Amino acid sequence: MSAKASNGNTYKHWRLETDIDGVAWLYIDRGDEKVNSLGTEVLNELEQIVTRVEADRPAGLVLMSGKPKSFIVGADVREFDATDKVSELEDNVKNVHGLFKRIEDLPFPTVVAFEGYCLGGGLELSLCFDWRIALDADHTRIGFPEVNLGIYPGFGGSGRSIRSMGGLNAMQIMLTGRMLRARAARGMGLIDQTVSRHGSLRWAARQAVSKKKKSRGPGLTARATTWTPVRKLLAGQMRKQTAAKARKEHYPAPYELIDAYEAAGNSTAEMIRIEAEKIPRLLAGDTSRNLRRVFRLMEELKAQGKRSDFKARRVHVIGAGVMGGDIAAWCASRGLEVTLQDREMKYIQPALKRAKSLFRRKLKTPPAVAAAQSRLIADVDGKGLAQADVVIEAIFEDRDAKRELFAEVDKKAPKHALLATNTSAIPLAGIADVLDDPSRLIGLHFFNPVAKMPLVEVVYDQKSDSDRVNDGSSFATQIGKYALPVTSTPGFLVNRVLAPYMRNAMKMHREGIPKEALDKAAEKFGMPMGPVELADTVGLDVGLGVIKTLMGDEAGEDRKVLEEMIEAGKLGKKSGEGFYKWKKGKPERDSSAAEGHDLDKLAEQLMQPYFDECRSCLRDRVVRSTDLLDAGMIFGTGFAPFRGGPMHYLESSAAESSEQANKEQS
């Protein structure tokens, strides 16, 4: 094979070159795409290349990426919906299995060397190579995210990862979808070698080929987790841990993977055979279809943050309470310089303490933690306001107080600065008219807890400057959040929907239904937590503010109950008691309180106001589309992802009911 012959434009998505030593260098560079993914056309070309190198027998084969700082993000998720016929899906999976086995069996040294994302199918392809090298850089991430799409690795990854890492390590990675940095992946045996960010992947790959390096596989302790008695013990523990996070009827994939590991975790070939049996059924199932819809919704939210080139360097947050302090800490953790203002230092100190805990959890290494701490600056006098690119007001929910504050901010903030309020329900018009230019105020509504909740509502009204709204979306994306543009109606989207839902729960509780039964019913439906626990978590004082804004005197008994609890110091989780008593961050429950209650019927009754308000928000055009509403409710309220969003769920339920009625008539 000559270099000249190899360099022709034979392939659309690959480039194959041979050097003077006879080593074949294969680069994946998917045409017309920013990132590499393994679509049908890409895999078909790879099959042609494998046939070619099988015949030519080069001195070695090295796989790299033709895209800078990026390897393979996985299979092409867009193609997953091409068919729901299990037989066709089985053929597709078996074809990939056959191709990857041919790569694994190549009779000469094979090396993969990469940087950037090596995920899903890309990692499964890498596991077919003799030696795996990754650049030890911040942008390198390695893992199996398939569980987030309602499946598990199906291109041979379940068997080959266990062979490379041992049963326990491999199962942890596959069951959690956790992405690893290069060193962590090497420590677990997923890759064999790391190269420093100043090193050369190509040189390391050439050395590996010349030395005919092969992965050694796991040590004795890791291998022991594939032995039959150990597998059975571990599988039982894995099921318990998985059940604490996800119900089998909602998310079958992790349970199917655990069953496969228990039955065949000592055989790579058998694990791969089981993939061909299980993965097609999972792909064709409702859970995977709906989770793929959630993936597309997530991509749509990401697109909201690409409407402007706005980039902030300095953020000034006013209000160091739970929300303001945590917003400031989050921004500092994302690399921004943040000044945090409140009336006295004693109000800022608790926020700095919480921030340090966040930095330790998120950033891990002492230098990174120290750097983040240095970026978060206590600022009682508000000196940072004059240099800020973004100003976020996060004081208590009082319209007059916010107006007074923004009248002062308007005098001191730079003209280019993005001015934002974190109000959870107050319409912009009620605050913005104190500004010389009311169009510059937007809402950036974060959710509690800031570090865990991925959504930020970017609030606008008819007077808002559209460029400022786009800048707000870009800022949310810059700090790693999903931006959801919403119109400035009372409660916006998320709180407007949650308020009647939670009010309904309070009414049902007053009528005698135990709070534990209500929460258990919601969780059985698929919500991440029940409405009563959610009220305590958000804070009853915050809930009261929302109810006052949305309903005023019409809130009646609900408002009175909350006011009495707040007067008694019962604010929810943050005070140690609300509807529940809280210990070590968890509510104390009466485990028998839900007995005798029809949880499915309760869930239906609980969720009805939620669905009604979603429909009302669409009619009022609070968001631009059904998809954005579904995205907002999934990422803002945790609406059961496996159901694909509230409007999608209602549409699917109506279609099922119609289909059932037609069957009964026929």
Image (spheres, grey):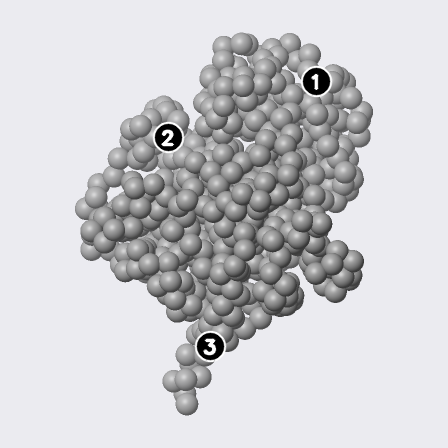
Amino acid at pointer 2: Lys
| Residue farthest to the front, as pictured | 21
Specify whether 567 is left or right of 597. Answer: right
Contact (CB < 8 A) between labels 1 and 3? no
The disc labelled 3 sits on which kind of residue? Ser
- Give the label on residue 573, or none: 2
CA neighbours of label 1 inside 10 A, class few (<14), some (14 to 19), many (20+):
many
Vertical position of residue 271 compared to residue 340: above or below: below
The residue under label 1 is: 385
Please say if the residues under marks 2 and 3 sit with CB atoms less than 8 Å apart. no
Kind of residue sitting beneath label 1: Leu
Q: Position of residue 636 (x, y in %)?
A: 52, 44
Which image quadrant: the N terminus? Answer: bottom right
Is 601 situated left or right of 411 in this image? left
Q: Which residue is mark 3?
A: 87
Structural distance between the alpha carbons of marks 2 and 3? 51 Å
Q: CA distance from mark 1 to mark 2?
A: 32 Å
Mark 2 or mark 3, which has the lower sequence index?
A: 3
